[in-house]
Image (cartoon, rainbow, N blue to C red):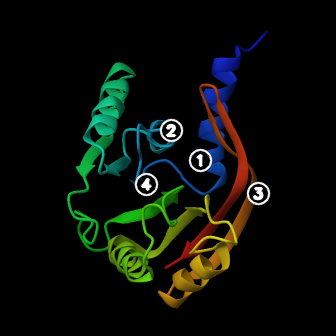
Amino acid sequence: MEISLDRWKSDSAENIMRHIGIDRGQKILDFGCGSGNYTIPIAKVVGGQGVVYALDENEEDLNKLMNEAKSMGLENIVKLEASDKSRIPLSTESVDMVLLYDILHYYYFPEETDRRQLLREIYRVLKPNGILSLYPTHLETNKVPNLEEVRREIEDSSFTKESEYSGLTMAHEDNTEIGLVISFRK
């Protein structure tokens, strides 16, 4: 049986999410979710017993994501607006994992104080032993921050490096990427 390229990419995106530790029934925060390249596959993996909190400051992207989710019959995505970057609108110790994919870099968080405030908020909303999953893009050595600075900031915020995954990080529509995902445990 021949599998279409679109089906392969959809399956791969879900498998990538499983490989980084996402499982059925979990509560996941996709911080800076954009139009949902990771949110949709995560919602499929966590299933009806799980929840994906989609947080972004771009209302248009959030609406696009929610419309796509609705058309796919996904009812486990909760839209969160990021009106205040210093506060995540979730209860303390309420999520199993937070994804920071292509977000913790100089464009969105150029100041160390802003990154540290975000890390404190992530620590607050993660359950005990929760995971911060980082896809560290745009952290070239000539930019501030670079990858080593970000790792130090995360570890200084009471997280412990758990694992690294190097390989396919996105398989969505015409967008495939190879990269590094680092997981830190609370």
Tell me how far mark 2 sits from mark 1, CA to CA.
11 Å
Three-letter amino acid code of the residue under disc 4: Gln
Rate crowding at label 1 as few (under 14), some (14 to 19) or many (20 or more) other CA atoms within 10 Å: many
- Percent across and percent down for residue 34 are 41, 43
Is 95 displayed left or right of 179 in the figure?
left
Query: What residue does disc 3 label?
Result: 166
Question: Residue drawn at (36%, 33%), measured in percent from left and top?
Answer: 65
Residues at marks 2 and 3 touching, judged by CB atoms closer than 8 Å: no
Question: Residue drawn at (37%, 77%), measured in percent from left and top?
Answer: 114
Rate crowding at label 4 as few (under 14), some (14 to 19) or many (20 or more) other CA atoms within 10 Å: many
Is 24 displayed left or right of 117 in the figure?
right
Q: Earlier in the sequence, mark 1 or mark 3?
A: 1
Q: Is residue 140 above or below residue 43?
A: below
Tell me how far mark 4 sits from mark 3, CA to CA.
23 Å
Instruction: Single out the mark in the foreground, 4 or 1.
Output: 1
Three-letter amino acid code of the residue under disc 2: Asn
Tell me how far mark 4 sits from mark 1, CA to CA.
12 Å
Tell me how far mark 2 sits from mark 4, CA to CA.
18 Å
Residue 17, label in figure: 1
Question: Residue drawn at (71%, 66%), measured in percent from left and top?
Answer: 164
- For mark 2, give the secondary structure: loop
Query: What residue does disc 2 label?
Result: 37
